[in-house]
Image: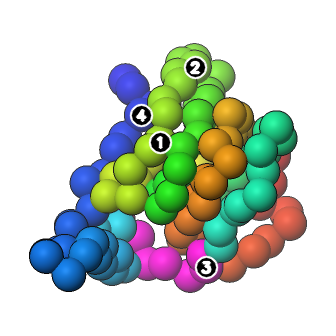
Amino acid sequence: MSLIKLIDLPSLGDQRGGLVAIESNQSIPFEIKRLYYIFNTTNQSRGFHAHIDLKQVAVCVKGSCRFILDNGHVREEVILSSPTQGLYIEALTWREMHDFSEDCVLLVLASEHYDESDYS
């Protein structure tokens, strides 16, 4: 079973420009309780952890980056480079982020509030 679960986000743009709407329990398969974004990470790697209960969707709203996902049985890589596509990361999945482009802005939507004890 593949760890790469990509979500196509609804693109509602027109001649005036692009627009992507993200909604809890609609385009995202959980209630969004927290969001954050990562930027200015050229020549850095991030992640190197799993979450016990938390689920996430990561969207490269600008630029690109490479994810490595591992659940102890399967290890897969995917490059995110579209603001209309999110990567759904289930609980108990190790994640690493590498090869951030200079202009990368990575938006992460989380199913729970921050909890230090949820990291493994």
The answer to whether the residue labelled 3 contacts the one labelled 4, judged by CB atoms less than 8 Å apart, is no
- Dot 1 or dot 2, earlier in sequence: 2
Between marks 1 and 3 in the image, the one whose residue lies nearer the viewer: 1
Residue that carries the numbered disc 1 in the rendered image: 80
- Dot 2 or dot 4, earlier in sequence: 4
**Which disc, if any, is residue 34?**
3
Q: Quote the CA–CA distance across marks 1 and 2.
A: 16 Å
Residue neighbourhood size for the residue with mark 3, other residues' Cα within 10 Å, grouped as few (<14), some (14–19), many (≥20): few
Residue neighbourhood size for the residue with mark 1, other residues' Cα within 10 Å, grouped as few (<14), some (14–19), many (≥20): many
Q: Quote the CA–CA distance across marks 3 and 4.
A: 22 Å
Residue under the image location 35 percent in, 67 percent down: 28
**Which disc, if any, is residue 4?**
4
Q: Quote the CA–CA distance across marks 2 and 4.
A: 10 Å
Between marks 4 and 1 in the image, the one whose residue lies nearer the viewer: 1
In the rendered view, tell whether residue 104 sits above or below residue 11.
Answer: above
The magenta segment is 29-35
Q: Secondary structure at mark 3?
A: strand
Which quadrant of the figure has residue 15?
bottom left
Tag 3: amino acid? Arg
- Magenta segment includes 34: yes
Tag 2: amino acid? Arg
- Dot 4 or dot 1, earlier in sequence: 4
Between marks 1 and 2 in the image, the one whose residue lies nearer the viewer: 1
Q: Secondary structure at mark 2?
A: strand
Q: How many marks?
A: 4
Tag 4: amino acid? Ile
